[in-house]
Amino acid sequence: MTTSLITRPRLVVLDTAHLTGLVADLVSGVCDRRRAAERFIPGLIESGWLPLLCWHHIEELLQHGDDQLVDARLHYLRSLPLVSWVRAADPAAGPGSVMDVLGFEAVAAHANQGSHALHVRNLVRDRLIDVGPGIQAIPEGLLDWRPLKATLVARQENARRITAISRWRTSNIDSTRIADWLNQPMRETPEAVCTLQHLRNGLEEEISTRGDKRITDPTAMASAFIADIARAGQRVCSTSHPSPAIQFLINAGLDLEDIDPSATFGETMDLLTFQKRLRIVSDANGLPWPGLKRTVTQQQLPVTVIEESMRAYAHDQPERKGSELNDMHLLCLAPYADVTYVDKRTLESVRRARSKVAVFDQLVGCVTRAGGYAEIAAGLAAQS
């Protein structure tokens, strides 16, 4: 292995389907398929490329009903002579997740106030990625993955819930200003119950028609979501704040000084989501929360630029599959890779976002698709 490859590798993000295809061929009884799979990663390395792995690859690889096949997938990754992976806060847990990437970015943006997202990416790149043999990327403890089954099922269900509900709106309130809500009184109980029932019925219909077909009980999912809204409303009723809208936002997690009456409802919800994630970064890295939220914005962090651009411009598919969330997480590796492979649906959404957001286009770089790992090998070899 050359020193230049180890110190300055070119990184490629494979779609999880390519990894599952590799292992399927490795364990098949067809000699040609098995030999082709055995040559794939060594061929990439010889051409100067390394796969870049993250936790979201591993999470998908673990989700199969055949435990022996899952074992084969993990043993394959551990057998790789050289690979790259996202550095995690806890190396014993395996490669890092999108939250680890976000943490590196937020720390860099905080230390370099006012930095552009591209500068933050450059600051983070060398600190974020580890390179070594597969046994370092996939720790031995991960081979005992079976106790994670219940957690993995819950995470799958949560991904389906998020993708089914996140785009749902009963009316176009995202463009209304917070100021428009300041003098709105709380609804009387009978009216509130009727409104919540109407919302629940509409959400159930949305989940049934547009949600992941693997959602087994749209009624229960809709009811649970609306019940959370009702509980939030009850907490507002129990306070004495003159504006129920302001109290609702404070209860949700925003500080009073961060609520801008001139901002739209959609902008405020985006800020709320961002600050919740930033608080996790603050706690994990021992950074003072007031200073972090004052110095770090969504526009500075490559992860949030990618997520917001895709949320705004990605094609709203007829069926909102839970796998879309994992596809998004893998796309967030693109700023740190030389080539990123995605599926056809994600590639079309990337194309749409590129035409709308210049910094998104610059961050994600080369994003493409391939029908299988043989096509990837040929494509990357041509770039060598």
Image (spheres, grey):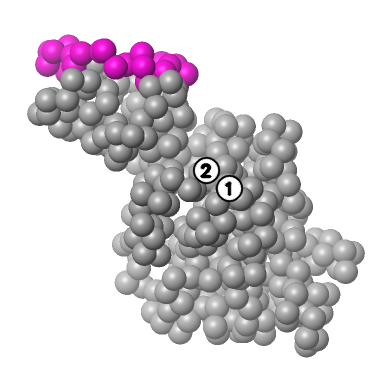
What residue is shown at x 26% (from left), y 34% (from top)? 250
Q: Is residue 24 visible?
A: no
What amino acid is found at the position of numbered circle 2 in the picture? Gln
Q: Identify the main secondary structure in magenta.
A: loop
Query: Residue 192 colored magenta?
Result: yes
Q: Looking at the image, is 38 positioned above or below residue 201?
A: below
Task: Give how far apart the Cα atoms at labels 1 and 2 are.
Answer: 12 Å
Q: Is residue 261 visible?
A: yes
* Residue on which the image places disc 1: 114
Residue 145 placement (x, y as % from top left) = 39, 74
Magenta stretch in the rendered image: 170-193
Question: How many other residues sit within 10 Å of disc 2, few (<14), some (14-19) or many (≥20)?
Answer: some
Label 1 residue SS: loop
Q: Quadrant of the N terminus?
A: bottom right
Residue 52 placement (x, y as % from top left) = 64, 68
Closer-to-camera residue (303/255): 255
Closer-to-camera residue (258/197): 258
What residue is shown at x 52% (from left), y 59% (from top)? 111
Q: Looking at the image, is 202 positioned above or below residue 337?
A: above
Question: How many other residues sit within 10 Å of disc 1, few (<14), some (14-19) or many (≥20)?
Answer: some
Label 2 residue SS: helix
Instruction: Tell me which corner region of the image, top left, top right, bottom left or bottom right, holds residue 149.
Output: bottom left
- Disc assigned to residue 298: 2
| Marked residue nearer the N-terminal end (1 or 2) | 1
